Amino acid sequence: MWYLCVFFHRLLDYRRAEVESLAEMLGVYSSLEWRLPENQHPDSPFHLVNLPSEDVARNIANRSILVKGIYELWGEGSSFEQLEEAIKNYPEDRKLPYLTCETTFKVTVDSFGKAISFQEQNDRIKSLAFIPFKGRVNLKNPDFNFWLMETDDYGAHNGLPPVVQKRIFFGRLVGGADRKLLPTYQLKSRRYLGPTAMDAEMAFLMANQAQVMPGKLVYDPFVGTGSILVAAAHFGAMTMGADIDIRAVRDGRGPDCNVWSNFKQYGLPLPVALLRADNNLPPWRPGLKEVIVFDSGYFFLNTMIPFHPLGAWLVRALTVDEMCEGYGSGSFECLAASLTMREGNTEENNSMSLVAPTQFHCIFDAILCDPPYGVRAGGRKSGGRKLLKGIVGPYTVPDDKRTDHIPSTAPYSLAECVHDLLDLAARMLVMGGRLVYFYPVLRENDVVENHFPEHPCFKLIASSEQILSSRYSRVLLTMVKTGSYTEKVAEAAIIKHQEFKENYVKWLGDCNLHSSVFSPAHPQLGEEPDSKSCKELKPKYRGKYV
């Protein structure tokens, strides 16, 4: 059935991608279709979407962040006369259940591109007198909420998508985004913040792109203050994070101001683990064989975690010595061990037992992150200048200095960082798992580079641009794991990485994105900027800048 999907007019590239990810999460992506209403611009908030049932439409709308509402469309037209005719022609058997005397209802008038006064809203509601409402009006908690929405033929000069002709829609609200999440999780009320903390809206969008749900294990290799994992935990996922700065994940700003306190602030389940780990030297090692399933729950480094009702298998907790084995000093320090959850256990067979050996390297259902790309914070990797130059050799930190030791680090280019991230995801994600991460692009003359990193194990299914300034954007890339990781795949990935680095993005490996973004503009000699030409009498359409 076709529904009217009305988006919030912001983050235009993210809107359809979010709905498509949620539709796939609900198993209905194959039946999803899009089309535009008559005379609507592709960036208009009004879209028509074909979904298999009203329950699916409601679940997608209620889970989304950018869907203002999904409506059962009773009629549309370029005038109120056309709208009336369309509503009268809508099947009676679909209208009557919502017009009975036992129901309560409310009519809301909304517009896009213009303001409507209170008197005009009342006049529009009175014009709907031809609809035989028999129920009572309830403005606070109605059984059914009807919406009358219209656009105006304002042309192309008010900063909004151009509309050729006025359009009016009337329909019954099926579901809409819970935007109350955003003020609840807004950063200005967050206890522990850093300079690169992800804002709440974008963190929830990333979680939706990754199809986060209860029972899934989500990992952020650049966890920082945990903003992305907070959104994942809100949707019921188990979370795990890592950061190269041990002070961020271990200490924070005190016992009541750290990553853990951000989860406690909202009453969310605490992360399964926080690691001091280097993305360039990942701590994960394959070949873990012992798997233990507990009866009513499991202990994990002195932390009790409830047994999930779906059932799960748990890889046993490793000791710090076991996890550090073979990685040398400074590669990581463990704040908690690692685990993996697998569906398949049931209430009948959840007694303690040993099961067949499993591959330890495929444990995460999703990896979400915002890699450091050098605009606000540059990337770092373990090593230090002297160690990387070979002036000093690898060393072991004495036991009496381990508690306060902060390992040396060196610059970490975005090219190397992205390659390591893709390699980590290829090894650690389950088949069909999602990698969702931000990738920066430079803008020149309003044109952006549309070539993105590739990997043989992954398929790129969505790229959503967010313009941050006239010089650069960040693109949210959503990739799905479609192939197994092998040594041949790893070699092919290195070749792809070198080709991408050499052919497309010259600034990627030189750590000069910061200078490209913030360097002053130099007008050509002999030319003076024309202040009059820089201003337009009417604002032009801003497009993706919203």
Image (cartoon, rainbow, N blue to C red):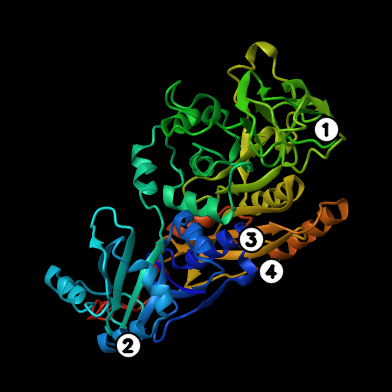
> Disc 3 or disc 4, which is closer to the eye?
3
> Disc 4 or disc 1, which is closer to the eye?
1
According to the picture, the residue beneath numbered tag 1 turns out to be: 288
Q: In which quadrant of the rendered view does residue 17 lie?
A: bottom right
Give the residue type at disc 2. Glu
Q: Is 276 displayed left or right of 80 in the figure?
A: right
Q: Is residue 60 above or below residue 46?
A: above
Q: Is 410 displayed left or right of 284 in the figure?
A: left
Q: Residues within 10 Å of mark 4 (few under 14, many from 20)?
A: few
According to the picture, the residue beneath numbered tag 2 turns out to be: 85
Residue 503: mark in rendering: 4
Counting from the top left corner in percent of width and height, residue 276 is at: 62, 30
**Residue at 45 percent of width and 65 percent of height:** 471
Alpha carbon separation for disc pair 3 and 4: 38 Å
Give the residue type at disc 3. Gly
> Disc 2 or disc 3, which is closer to the eye?
2
> Disc 2 or disc 1, which is closer to the eye?
2
Q: In which quadrant of the rendered view does residue 343 lie?
A: top right
Label 3: element kind: loop
Alpha carbon separation for disc pair 2 and 4: 58 Å
Give the residue type at disc 1. Leu
Ranked by sequence position, the earlier of labels 3 and 1 is: 3
Q: In which quadrant of the rendered view does residue 462 lie?
A: bottom right
According to the picture, the residue beneath numbered tag 3 turns out to be: 27
Q: Residues within 10 Å of mark 2 (few under 14, many from 20)?
A: few
